[in-house]
Amino acid sequence: MDMNTGKIELPKQAREFGFFVDGKWVSAGARKLIERRSPAHDVAVTRITRCTVEDLNHAVSVARQAFTDRRWSGLSGTDRAAVLLKAAEGIRARAEELALLETLESGKGISQSRGEVLGAASIYEYAAGAARALHGDTFNNLGDNMLGLVTREPIGVVGLITPWNFPFFILSERVPFILASGCTIVAKPSEVTSATTLVMAEILSDAGLPAGVFNVVTGSGSEIGQAMTEHDDIDMLSFTGSTAVGRRALLASVGNFKKLGLELGGKNPQVVFADADLDEAADGVVFGICFNAGQCCVSGSRLIVEKSVAADFEARIAEKLSRVRVGDPLDPRTQVGAIVTEQQHDTILSYIGKGREEGARLVCGGGPLVTDQGRFVMPTVFSDVTMDMAVAREEIFGPVLTISTFETFDEAMELANDTVYGLAASIWTKNLDKATNAFRRVQAGRVWVNTTIAGGPDLPIGGFKQSGHGRETGIYGVEEYTEVKTVHIALGKRDLWV
Ligand code: NAD
């Protein structure tokens, strides 16, 4: 580490991982490996195993056995909570290792990774409480001869597919809730960011999670992921990723009618009214598009600003963006790191090209940041954007903001809802009536008023429209992984039918 800047050095060699099934590491053996190069430095940092469909089938049968023999689901909420609390301790103890792996594989700034890892530990602590709070219902109003119960039972074996943008944080918004419900898991992380999921398997095992309850297979989405979506012995699939792959998962689930939790894409509006605190709103908009280099499902990528303040607001954004630090993710001062893959980099640049061709006015940015190594994109803003342009309609998943203007409240709401997505929205105004009317009208699973990308595990998350199905986190996030069972208990002597 550089003592003046706090900048971390690249590891000397790539770390190699097997996969984790039935409480043990399985080494790659003769299987192929997938090498991951740091997107910011172009050097190999990890190698993971390209698991086969047989490996997946074995992991599912292990998770099935662990579910059926009730080694986990049969424990009390208190005992499950104890394991989750120990896991939180384990995450804190290995926080620096996890944060570094996350940064090396994803390209996000190390300070951000550290924050996400510590945030993840606190999610496990929240979910420990939820494991104890989970309960059903009783109907004591059915007369003296009948008692009604509604019990919640864990749904069974859960397949968990996660994306590359927040590999550890998204995993942690799912796993402790699934475990709190009593289910068992087979997880498949993104092939470019699998390391922290694998380390988590070891942390959970060290925390006392029984063998076979949390298993990880690694490999390609089109092979292992697709086989998971089709698998007849997986009871529920929690998929987080693009809407296109989510649609495939939906189609593939028909074989056994598995329950689906889908957390998909977004094209999220930032609605700024003239009476907002414009400086704070501009700060929020800049954060909302730069966070994780815009590779964030809840990125505020569509600014919809009241015409009377639009020019002033645009200038504020450009000025603030000029001060955002883009660069080496191993430097703790970096705010915007690298773009995750060559393909994602090309996609973002092609959208910037489209924005120009479609006649949007470039305010700032507009291309790659030229560096000796790695791939970076300068935060980019397009103004005079209309909703027929691809940059306004499609999820770019990069630091590209579009600006459109409105004159009336209704027009603002129409623009905000003019999208197939419904993941998140932010509203900036100091007028309470306006804020309330706006959050009621906007079609999104998560709405922020006078802030953006904020909040913890207490409240549920999920999308409207093509942004998904179901909810994660909060007590809803545990209930999501349960089946509801209705029980009628007859009391006293039966009134004979025959
Ligand atoms: P992706 O859909 O390409 O991949 C997500 C996961 O699915 C990966 O693990 C991948 O290996 C796997 N996969 C790929 N093909 C598959 C297939 N045919 N069957 C099953 N699994 C398959 O998404 P990504 O590029 O990793 O992530 C970016 C996308 O994820 C964006 O659209 C973003 O909005 C979305 N996302 C949504 C949320 C949310 O909470 N709503 C959070 C993060 C990311």
Image (tube, helix red, strand yellow):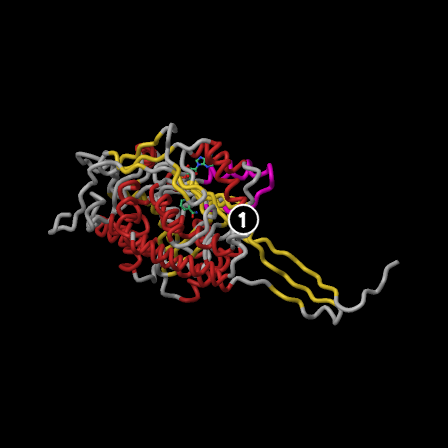
Camera-nearest residue between 467 and 98 = 98
Q: Quadrant of residue 473?
A: bottom left
Q: Is residue 254 left or right of residue 461?
A: right
Q: Which residues are magenta?
A: 243-263
Percent coordinates x, y for residue 167 in the rendering: 36, 45
Q: Is residue 49 above or below residue 293?
A: above
Question: Looking at the picture, which amino acid does disc 1 mark?
Answer: Phe
Q: Main secondary structure of the magenta part?
A: helix
Q: Quadrant of residue 127?
A: bottom left
Camera-nearest residue between 385 and 226 = 226
Q: Is residue 482 visible?
A: yes
Q: Is residue 245 left or right of residue 378?
A: right
Element type at marker 1?
A: helix
Q: Is residue 260 left or right of residue 170?
A: right
Q: Is residue 105 above or below residue 429?
A: above
The residue at 13%/48% (across/down) is 2
The residue at 34%/58% (across/down) is 89
Q: Mark 1 = which residue? A: 67
Percent coordinates x, y for residue 151 in the rendering: 61, 60
Reply yes or no: does residue 258 show up in magenta. yes
Camera-nearest residue between 276 and 286 = 286
Q: Indicate the quadrant of ligand 1 in the picture.
A: top left
For disc 1, the neighbor class at 10 Å (few under 14, some 14 to 19, many from 20) is many
Q: How many marks?
A: 1
The residue at 28%/60% (across/down) is 280
